[in-house]
Image: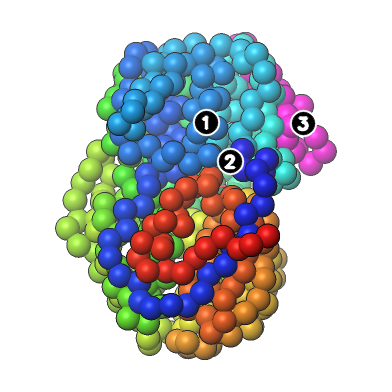
Amino acid sequence: MSGHSAPIPMISTARGPLRGTAHVPGDKSISHRALILGALAVGHTRITGLLEGEDVLDTGRAMRAFGAEVVRDDDGTWHVHGVGVGGFAEPAQVVDCGNSGTGVRLIMGAMATSPITATFTGDASLNSRPMARVTDPLALFGARAVGRAGGRLPMTIIGAADPVPVRYAVPVPSAQVKSAILLAGLNAPGETVVIEAEATRDHTERMLAGFGAEIVTRPTDEGHEIALTGRPELRPQTIAVPRDPSSAAFPVCAALIVPGSDVLVPGIGLNATRAGLFDTLREMGADLTFETMRDEGGEPVADLRARFSPDLKGVEVPPERAASMIDEYPVLSVVAAFAEGPTAMRGVGELRVKESDRIAAMADGLRAAGVEVEDGPDWWVVHGRGAGGVPGGAQAASRLDHRIAMSLLVLGLASRAPMRVDDGAPIATSFPVFEPLMTGLGACIRRAEG
Ligand code: S3P
């Protein structure tokens, strides 16, 4: 519930190299899904490595509101006692999903095919984001949604008492929309099919299969389709959440642009639907290696090693890669500022409807720091100034967006003058230990006075 906390102004400054090992927290996408599927299974699911960021904690509270028991051991293991598919109770209060689009959209899907009503809200960022992309397909199951103008939260979903299965081609590349439909399909009889033109993160599909649902992905002329057989009995699981590649991106990118750096980031999930940033960085000439590739709990995992890379070159990021690195464009734009020549990012209109308009937020921050940026509705180009070439010395706004706050702070670590960010409080939604982890590597990131 980050929007409710007082702003925390922060400053980052160039100092010596970044060195050491960075243990980033658990994957946010997988953590949400573990809690929700645990709540929909019959019995006791155990989760280790759960991200204890505000977004995920809000989803845990929501699962309690729908009737599941969710408890944390002192050792950090989470236990979910699920109520079974179709077993959700009606929440007694408004469900507050804080800053989390993933949380609210997945939970709306999960409850939409049960005969219950729930009202959802969030912080100022979440309450400005579009929800019709989820409520349109949920209406096909028989659910009704009543929200504010433009399909915004607060919004009430009246679940379908007699749901029918759905076949739906997702119009925007979105794992949240795909997942909401699949979770709704769990309590519809027969087969629910989602058609995706572009592959988005597939954690929901993998985890549903792990919980015992019948789910298959088939190639089609339009991309591929995912077919789920409704009304399974989900079997509780033991889930080890891999560390988040989207969080790993911050120490990795910082190491590439801060002279003399050498950072190891162990145990990072490298699911191909999430790993686009690392391909792009290597194309730019980054000294980035994957060590000890392995499989952990059904997800590919590796140790990443990033070293200072003085000869980065601007690249054209292939638009078809966008879904696999959608959350990483803000921090990529920071690396691009320290590369030689332009980096063009096209086919990324979705960035405008994230926790903030991420193209506008980063373009403003980079321009304030002395970097030339061009942008249009679904594209932007960052004109790199080469290693050590970014002036910095500016204040920028994080716009209630954790990834903007962290990206701007990484920018300040390699700029000639410090960067100041108006509010670092949103960082707690996804990466609560960002500040101590980065300072532990030698970075100068601190809370500013007032
Ligand atoms: C997520 C999907 C993506 C991503 C978000 C997490 C998920 O959103 O930006 O941070 O866990 O499914 P979209 O589905 O809107 O692209």
Magenta residues span: 138-163
Q: Residue at x 39, y 31 (%)?
A: 34
Q: Amino acid at mark 1?
A: Thr
The image shows a total of numbered marks equal to 3
Task: Evaluate if marks 3 and 2 touch, with contact meaning CB atoms under 8 Å apart.
Answer: no
For marks 3 and 2, give the CA distance.
17 Å
Q: Mark 1 packing: few (<14 Cα in 10 Å), some, or many (20+)?
A: many
Q: Amino acid at mark 3?
A: Gly
Point out residue 149 in the picture as x, y percentages from the top left corner: 82, 38
Quadrant of res 104: top right
Q: Residue beneath label 3, please?
A: 147
| Quadrant position of the N terminus in the picture | top right
Q: Residue at x 38, y 37 (%)?
A: 50
Point out residue 40 in the picture as x, y percentages from the top left corner: 44, 19
Colour setting: rainbow
Task: Evaluate if marks 1 and 2 touch, with contact meaning CB atoms under 8 Å apart.
Answer: yes
**Mark 3, secondary structure of its residue:** strand
Point out residue 349 in the picture as x, y percentages from the top left corner: 63, 60
292 in magenta: no
Q: Residue at x 26, y 40 (%)?
A: 298
Q: Amino acid at mark 2?
A: Ser
Q: Earlier in the sequence, mark 1 or mark 3?
A: 1
Q: Earlier in the sequence, mark 3 or mark 2?
A: 2
Rendered image: mark on residue 241: none
Q: Residue beneath label 1, please?
A: 59
Q: Decide which of 257, 443 is in the foreground and name it.
A: 443
**Mark 2, secondary structure of its residue:** loop
Q: Residue beneath label 2, please?
A: 100
Q: Nearer the viewer, mark 1 or mark 3?
A: 1
| Quadrant position of the C terminus in the picture | bottom right
